Amino acid sequence: MKTPTQTRYYTPQEYLELEEQSEDKHEYRDGEIVPMAGGTTNHNKIALNFCRQFPLSIGDIDYEVYLGEVKLWIPKYRQYTYPDVMVIEGEPIYEGTGTTTVINPTLIVEVLSNSTRNYDQGDKFDFYRSLPQFREYLLICPDEDRVKQFSKTSENQWLLTEYRNPEDEIQLRAIAFQISLREIYRRVNVRETSKN
């Protein structure tokens, strides 16, 4: 009879020390360290396309844009994660003494994959919503022209808008910015993505 394998739990500090030495990225989920799946070239193109279009200043407001390498700490749920894209209004607020982990995104963009699709739309969105500055969430499908936009309208209320036409313009509510699906999917072959 096989005995069940016992899960090893780590402190946030142990995770940070291991992550600093690791060649691969991992998420931290309340004691568990979870390897992150590798992204496809199309996944990367979609995230880059969004970042290329996003201005660093809009009117009198400055923004910081981070692409996949900066950690996000979610204190209420003890989670460290690497969103595909984070936009911060004004200055980043760092967790700890370094500059590798932030806690105050206004907008998060996730490019979905088969392995993360349900998590990104479910539990992860729950975790993100616990962050006070977080007000907008874009979920981008890499295998079809489809984007889901969740916008915070008031405390505990989020509005869902879906886009499926390449000519559709996504108008952000938290930031005075719009982008078309055509710009998001520029040079992305969705048929190629659907094979992965």
Image (cartoon, rainbow, N blue to C red):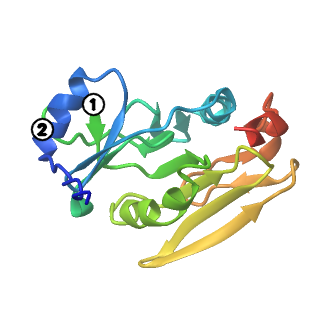
Residue 162 is marked as: none
Residue sitting at 76 percent across and 54 percent down? 146
Q: Which residue is under mark 2? A: 14
Q: Nearer the viewer, residue 79 or 107?
A: 79
Confirm or deny contact between disc 2 and disc 1 (CB under 8 A).
Answer: no
Residue sitting at 11 percent across and 40 percent down? 13
Classed neighbour count for the residue bearing mark 2: other residues with Cα under 10 Å, few (<14), some (14–19), many (≥20): few
Q: Which quadrant of the rendered structure holds the C terminus? A: top right
| Horizontal side of residue 70 vs 32, given as left or right | right
Residue 24 vertical placement versus 146 (above, below): above
Task: Identify the secondary structure beneath mark 2.
Answer: helix
Q: Which residue is under mark 1? A: 100
Q: Position of residue 35 (x, y in %)?
A: 37, 39
Classed neighbour count for the residue bearing mark 1: other residues with Cα under 10 Å, few (<14), some (14–19), many (≥20): few
Residue sitting at 41 percent across and 29 percent down? 69
Residue 33 vertical placement versus 5 (above, below): above
Residue farthest to the front, as pictured:
1
Q: Is residue 49 visible?
A: yes
Tell me which label, 2 or 1, sits earlier in the chain.
2
The kind of residue tagged 2 is Glu
Measure the C-alpha gap from mark 2 to mark 1.
16 Å
